Amino acid sequence: MTRQLLALLASGLLSASAFAQVSVTEPWIRATVPQQKVTGAFMRVQSATPARLVGVQTEVAGRAELHEMAMDGQTMRMRRVESIELPAGKPVNLASGGYHVMLMDLKRQVKEGETVAVTLNVQDAAGKRQDVKVNVPVKPLTHSAHH
């Protein structure tokens, strides 16, 4: 019985640690000018197991949403998406011109050089959710990531 209990605990720890392996690299937020109410957050997200990015929050914005830029005929359009797939072991870029995070109803100016706390909500294939906290540096208005 003890052996079974240990095996059960070990398998639970292994599955929890596999799910916990969501990494975020190269995060940044575009600085704003006074009175600006919207900006974008960009980063590379990777999960060790199949998962989905299902939400985002930050205290600097009244709303934070997942968005996608895509061509609609000859016009580039931005639209809100409910989730972004995170295939196992494959990095997903949240960047200008594709999937990204929109920070809306900003409560204050976001200034170059500061760091903003952002929480990503990730859901695994079984529906279990995990919050991933990221400290995101604010880059100049003219910054452009080169992936």
Image: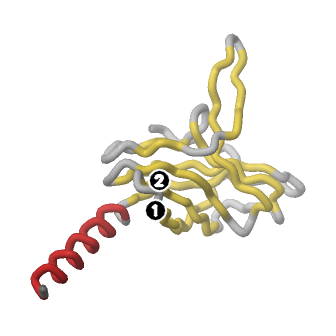
Q: Which residue is mark 1?
A: 128
SS at circle 1? loop
User: Is residue 34 shown above or below 69?
Assistant: below
Q: Whole-percent x and y of residue 37?
A: 84, 53
Q: Which residue is mark 2?
A: 26
Image coloring type:
secondary structure
Q: Farthest top residue?
A: 74
Q: Quadrant of residue 79?
A: top right
SS at circle 2? strand
Q: Whole-percent x and y of residue 104?
A: 78, 53
Tell me the residue at 50%/57% (across/down).
Answer: 122
Q: Quadrant of the N terminus?
A: bottom left
Q: Residues within 10 Å of mark 1 (few under 14, many from 20)?
A: few
User: Is residue 85 shown above or below 120?
Assistant: above
Q: Whole-percent x and y of residue 14?
A: 24, 69
Tell me the residue at 63%/26% (across/down).
Answer: 70
Q: Residues within 10 Å of mark 2 (few under 14, many from 20)?
A: some
Q: Amino acid at mark 1?
A: Lys
Please give left or right for residue 43 compared with residue 66 in the image. Answer: left
Q: Amino acid at mark 2?
A: Glu
Q: Farthest left residue?
A: 3
